[in-house]
Image: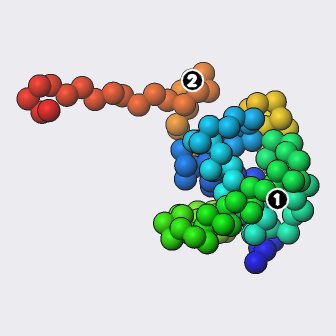
Amino acid sequence: MTRPHITIGGIKRAVAVRYGVSVTDIVSARRTRRVTWPRRIGMYLAKTLTPHSLVTIGAQFGKRDHTTVLSAVDKAHLEVSTNEFLAEEVRDVTRDICAASMTILGRLLATPEIGALEDELNSMGLELVIMPLGTRDETGFPKKKMATHQTGENQ
């Protein structure tokens, strides 16, 4: 069932967060297991949750051919339909995507202008990161968290 308020960019972001990889990793040429499963699930969800064609999905996932997307979608569907743990994992990611798409930030990220900016940044190997106010230092980089040091007594 496609949902018009869900974007491929939103799917990539939600999948990246869920699996602890970056959007740049998902659209990269890397073939490590750490990246291939999230990429496959992202393509599968893009096909099932959006009205986009295999060609469009492939373009959004690192300029991949439509046959690569079809293969990823088929493999993900098979794995999800035969493994209840993976099916629950995909349901959780889908809930995350739907919830994020309904927020103000989710709607902002779904605008064509932001989507185009994100695509352009991704094509240059960069990632659009939105952070809460006050989380950057004076140079514009994320503030570093203070490391806590445990003494031998607390270990």
Residue annotated with mark 1 = 70
Residue 66 rendering spot, x and y as whole percentages: 89, 53
Count the marks.
2
Q: Position of residue 84 (x, y in %)?
A: 51, 71
Q: Nearer the viewer, mark 2 or mark 1?
A: 1
Front one among 122 and 57? 57
* Point 82% across, 50% down: residue: 68
Could one spot residue 64 in this view of the protein?
yes
Q: Is residue 144 above or below residue 32?
A: above
Q: Position of residue 81 (x, y in %)?
A: 61, 72
Amino acid type at circle 2 is Glu
Along the line of sight, which residue is nearer the eye, 10 or 79? 79
Going by the picture, which residue comes out furthest to the left? 153
Q: Nearer the viewer, residue 125 or 62?
A: 62
Inspect this view and state whether residue 11 appears. Answer: no
Of the residues shown, which amino acid type is indicated by label 1? Leu
Other residues around mark 1 within 10 Å, as few (<14) / some (14–19) / many (≥20): some
User: Is residue 106 shown left or right of residue 110?
Assistant: left
Say which quarter of the image contains residue 112: bottom right
Whether residue 85 is situated above or below residue 118 in the rendered picture: below
| Residue of label 2 | 138
